[in-house]
Image (cartoon, rainbow, N blue to C red):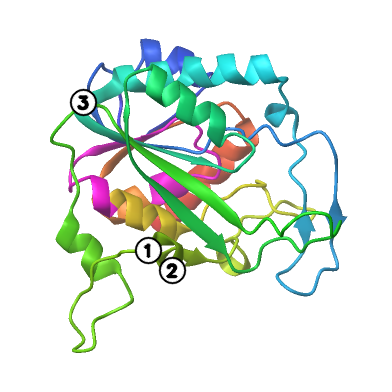
Amino acid sequence: MEINKIYKGDCNEIMQNEIDKESISLIFADPPYNLSGSSLNLKNNKTGGAFYKVNEDWDTFDDKEYLDFTKKWIKSAISTLKSNGSLYISCTQHNIGEILIVGKELGLKLNNILIWYKVNAMPNITKRTFTHSTEFVCWFVKGKNWVFNYETVKKINPNKTKTGADKQMRDFLDFITLPIVQGKERLRGDNGRALHPTQKPERLLELIIQASSNKGDIILDPFFGTGTTGVVAQRLQRKWIGIEINEKYIEMSKKRIKKEK
């Protein structure tokens, strides 16, 4: 097993054959959400930059295919986790049901569901539903004695007590208030569009990695995408492993990580 490396290929095959069993302290996974199949183009939107609905081949499954896919990759991920390891899975209302069912079925303990409120979420075009302005991160643990750096997390919290002291985070809805990635942090292709439709904010990964790992631990991301997990893990003095099947994302991740170094 090699660390600080992006493995190219199917995440199940690589987790089963290349990653040492029970070697990983923390996994952050941003799997396909299964919400593709139609397009929406708001390139002239004024509230938060251009919006494009996720519509990718790798994000299209029927219901049974998606449940089978979810079971397969989570089972593979569990085998790589240490006995007290943590698994964080990013999701929306489109796929949180499958993730919760599979996690319970495979014996994981659900500690929290973090809520990310997107301050510049896609506007409500249809006017037939409430605005979709949140995503979720399910935090599962494999066994007992999991890592949770409580005092560190208190220091990360921008909300302080009346005396200015560090404050316990009681409501993650108030805490994880972050925009969809825009500006310099957003990776873009030659056409100016976002290179990856679901690039996650670095601040979200900073919270997760500092909360549930220690310096020197190995962080695994089985859907590496634009490499945010690797960039932040490296910055926080953790080791990392990425798995990605898309060559375009791999090349951009390598450039991004090299720039961070």
Point out the frontmost of discs 1 and 3.
1
Q: Secondary structure beneath disc 2?
A: helix
Say if residue 204 shows up in the picture.
yes
Say if residue 192 shows up in the picture.
no
Which residue appears at 41% of the width and 57% of the height?
A: 260
Callout 1, which amino acid?
A: Asp
Which residue appears at 76% of the width and 35% of the height?
A: 36
Q: Quadrant of residue 132?
A: bottom right
Seen from this angle, which residue lies furthest bottom? 163
In the rendered image, residue 79 lying in the magenta stretch gets the answer no
> What range is drawn magenta here?
210-231
Residue 171 marker? 1
Indicate which disc, 1 or 3, sits on the residue closer to the N terminus: 3
Q: Which residue is mark 3?
A: 82
Q: Secondary structure beneath disc 3?
A: strand
Q: Which residue is mark 2?
A: 174
Callout 3, which amino acid?
A: Lys
Q: Secondary structure beneath disc 1?
A: loop
CB of mark 2 within 8 Å of CB of mark 1?
A: yes
Callout 2, which amino acid?
A: Asp
In the rendering, at what x and y percent does residue 105 appear? 40, 17
In the rendering, at what x and y percent does residue 198 appear? 62, 47
CB of mark 3 within 8 Å of CB of mark 2?
A: no
